[in-house]
Image: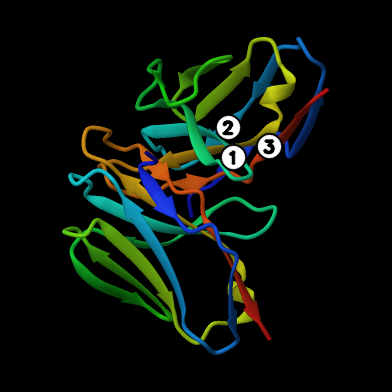
Amino acid sequence: DVKVTQSSRYLVKRTGEKVFLECVQDMDHENMFWYRQDPGLGLRLIYFSYDVKMKEKGDIPEGYSVSREKKERFSLILESASTNQTSMYLCASSLKPDGYGYTFGSGTRLTVV
Amino acid sequence: QKEVEQNSGPLSVPEGAIASLNCTYSDRGSQSFFWYRQYSGKSPELIMSIYSNGDKEDGRFTAQLNKASQYVSLLIRDSQPSDSATYLCAVISSGSARQLTFGSGTQLTVLP
């Protein structure tokens, strides 16, 4: 089974801190994604990547950046955390070709105080 | 207009009944459709995928797709309390290859 591992289950950070959320997948998937999930708003795509060194903005990229130096690792960076970034963050990966569903990590619950 | 719409619920059904979950999407060119189940405090897990018009059955789950009506549904037969979860509809739209767009989910409760 594909495993997608997110490094932290719960995080509490202070406003203005730089925050790194790490995601690693073990099945050589090309595609990786970062979503945030908020009550009533569902899952919203922040950034995605189809290959190493490649990144594309999703629907809500403001305040975030990403890094993909290795195929298996996709990091989400909050440059200067704000309270409105308090959320559940979900990483996912998927196989080629297009049209396959995603496998999600267990999520990181981030609280910014 | 949201691209993928679901009734948020909550939807309650008695144990043993059929639960019917519905989803509409706005992009007529969409090709791939998925249902995810998400238990409280857990991440979504893929339970069904469907790509062609008609029905697709897997155990107690049946996905139905009608591209003309831009409608996809999930039926759960013989519902069990363990089916209580939020069900997310997700679509890969034309022009956004490999990106899933999710509905906001329908919360299902199966009453013993």
Which numbered disc flags the more N-terminal residue, 3 or 2?
Answer: 2
Q: Residue at x 68, y 86 (%)?
A: B112
> Which is nearer the eye, B16 or A27?
B16
Above or below — where is B88 with respect to A112? below
Viewer-closest of A50 and B21: B21
Residue A89 placement (x, y as % from top left): 62, 35
Q: Upstream in the sequence, badge 3 or badge 1? A: 1
Vertical comparison of B83 with A84: above or below: below
Mark 2–mark 1 distance (CA, rounded to whole Å): 16 Å
Which amino acid type corresponds to the residue marked 1 in the rendered image? Answer: Gln
Q: Quadrant of the C terminus of chain A?
A: top right
Q: Which residue is drawn at 65% across and 53% down?
A: B42
Residue at image mark 1: A37
Q: Is mark 3 on a helix, strand or loop?
A: strand
**Amino acid at pointer 3:** Thr
The amino acid on which the numbered mark 2 sits, given as a three-letter code, is: Cys
- Residue linked to disc 3: A108
Give the chain letter at badge 1.
A
CA separation, marks 3 and 2?
Answer: 10 Å
Residue tagged by mark 2? A23
| Mark 1 closeness class: few <14, some 14–19, many ≥20 residues within 10 Å | some
Q: Are marks 3 and 1 on the same chain?
A: yes
Colour setting: rainbow
Q: Are marks 3 and 2 in contact (CB under 8 Å)?
A: no
Q: Which of A33 and B96 is in front in this view?
A: B96
Seen at 39% across and 69% down, the residue is B74
Q: What element carries label 1?
A: strand
